[in-house]
Amino acid sequence: MTIQTIAIDEIHRNKRQPREFFEPVALQELADSIKRFGLMQPIEVRRDSDAGGFEIVAGERRWRAHQIAEISQIKCIITADDLTEMERFKRSVAENINRADMTPMEEARAFRRILDEQEGAEAKDVAKEFGKSSQYVMLRLALLDLTEEVQQHVNSGAIGTQAAVQIAALTPGNQRAVMAKWAKGAFAGDNELVHFAYALKQQQGQVVAMLIEDMSPEERAERQRERTKTRSSIDRIEQVMGLLEELAKADPMKLALALEGEAGKRLDQMDRVADAVAKARFNMRQAKAHAEAREIARLNPDAEHQSLAAPAKPKPPAGPQAPAEPAAQAEPAAPRPKTPAKRAAAKPQVPAQRKAPAKPKAPAKRAASVTA
């Protein structure tokens, strides 16, 4: 191993290294630190017999920071070039993947490259090599179905990975519709975005709910009964608020005397009520997401999307101490990776001239099971 000071302009990046996005603020902070304290750890390079000079093996971020700091030379460890290109690539991935340096999209592309170019490689092998679970690798691969717009927001951290996986299961048209809604501030956070994207995935490609004028008298009556029953049930819940408010204002000492040794039992009773309220509220959040998603699904009927992602329904809260606003923590089930041959067939680089889509036939009788 040789340590040498090399001119910055004699060094070039590995064009096929996994990292593509470097956070500008963090890069400037590193440049400022190097200007003040110097480089703590040399970068690693190899002699490049093809392009000339030296190619970075590890430490591109430090090299970029030197350029920002306008430092003309950098300390380097010159390594013997006895690795294959894939081995060098994997080494670069390993250097970054367990730190905050790689974005989810960069990980996804790195995993895909290994699967495509390494003979016999499977997701479980990639997962083991980098200390990840197979599901982790598969969920990253699912992100490759995101549109460029969504990928940029994932790279910047504006949209979390869990929400991104759910969005990846949508058609490109529906992804654009979700992003338009997101850009208007329609979602309080990633949790609401997860709920909405999942609801839209369930609805895309389904038959639109039957219009009232298309229903038979019996179907119309059944729908009205269902609406009346549901709304009446929710209205009755509102009546309980007065009782709860009265209980909340009671003096605890007087309450203990009034319950005469049943305080613990009654607390368990309240916990069961709180648990039921949390689950009901979760379901209502899902219903709200479905109601909003239905309009987008109606406006974007652009074919059922064969996505890598197979989303799982977000799990409702469990236990008597469920939070008031339960977050959907479940991630979608792992998709099956495509082989290079299948991937090429599924996404040809030069598509043939598209034919005008055939006008879909109207169904003889649309389903009446979907309520408005």
Image (tube, helix red, strand yellow):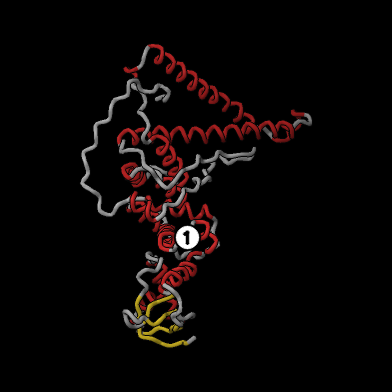
> Which residue appears at 35% of the width and 45% of the height?
175
Q: Nearer the viewer, residue 58 or 235?
A: 58
- Position in image of residue 55 (x %, y %): 38, 78
Q: Is residue 311 left or right of residue 178?
A: right
Q: Is residue 197 left or right of residue 260?
A: left
- Position in image of residue 253 (x %, y %): 73, 35
Q: Nearer the viewer, residue 111 or 157?
A: 111
* Res. 188 visible in picture: no
- When the figure is inspected, residue 364 is found, relative to residue 161, above or below; the finding is above
Quadrant location of residue 207? top left
> Which residue appears at 42% of the width and 36% of the height?
202
Q: Is residue 275 left or right of residue 148?
A: right
- When the figure is inspected, residue 175 is found, relative to residue 66, above or below; the finding is above
Q: Quadrant of the C terminus?
A: top left
> Which residue appears at 20% of the width and 46% of the height?
353
Q: Nearer the viewer, residue 223 or 363?
A: 363
State how many labels appear.
1
Quadrant location of residue 166? top left
- Position in image of residue 110 (x %, y %): 42, 62
- Position in image of residue 117 (x %, y %): 41, 63
For the residue labelled by badge 1, is the local secondary structure a helix, a strand or a loop? loop
* Res. 220 visible in picture: yes
Quadrant location of residue 13? bottom left
Amino acid identity at mark 1: Ala
Q: Residues within 10 Å of mark 1 (few under 14, many from 20)?
A: few
Q: Nearer the viewer, residue 243 or 224?
A: 224
- When the figure is inspected, residue 76 is found, relative to residue 354, above or below; the finding is below
Residue at which label 1 appears: 121
- Residue situated furthest right in the rendering: 261
> Which residue appears at 41% of the width and 81% of the height?
46
- Residue situated furthest top in the rendering: 217
